Amino acid sequence: MQQQLAAGQVAVRMLFDGNQSRMQVLAAVKVNATPETIWRVLTDCEHAANFIPGVKRCRRVQSAPDDSWEIVEQEAKYSWFMPAVTTMIRAEYQRPHRIDFKRISGDLKQEDGNWVLASAADAATIVEYELYVDPGFWIPRVLLRHSLRAELPAALTAVRERAESTVANR
């Protein structure tokens, strides 16, 4: 993964759980921006559909008075062969370095994971994403693998481009 990050690529690894459609996804990207700048991009629910491929709608349902957590509803369509999926998640925030999220309702059986923003030696930030998902229905692995190998790098690249363009426009 380190070689892919150094080359400016999005690193992605998928681990399937037995013969099921349940899986763990690990991904990372190097971004030339501070964790705070990336944080603002990751938590920009109102504009997520404008720059993240697959996101159709995102809305805040409830937020903590101290911004330590929020409940977000998101609709996404990640692949032509899958229907749009609506999920309500609770996101726990440790600004600006970690977001933990967990499905509380929606179309998927289970969806939880985290975002970790770690400063790199060259003033860049390594953005790590981990997701465990159980759709609750069977999907051929070849289709899941194909979809995630295209969609996940596109989404992380969009986050990188948005954060880096924010820095460039200052």
Image (spheres, rainbow, N blue to C red):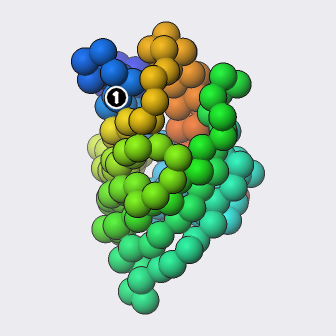
Q: Is residue 163 left or right of residue 140?
A: right
Residue at 34 percent across and 67 percent down: it is 92
Label 1: element kind? strand
Q: Is residue 119 left or right of residue 58?
A: left
Q: Which residue is mark 1?
A: 23
**Residue 79: in sight, yes or no?**
yes
The foreground one among 116 and 167 is 116
Residue at 54 percent across and 15 percent down: it is 143
Q: Position of residue 89 (x, y in %)?
A: 45, 60
Residue farthest along the right direction in this orientation: 50
Q: Position of residue 160 (x, y in %)?
A: 56, 43
The foreground one among 145 and 27 is 145
Up the image or down, 31 lies above or below 88; here it is above
Residue at 63 percent across and 51 percent down: it is 75
Residue farthest along the front direction in this orientation: 137
Residue at 69 percent across and 55 percent down: it is 57
The foreground one among 33 and 127 is 127
Residue farthest along the bottom direction in this orientation: 65
Residue farthest along the top direction in this orientation: 142
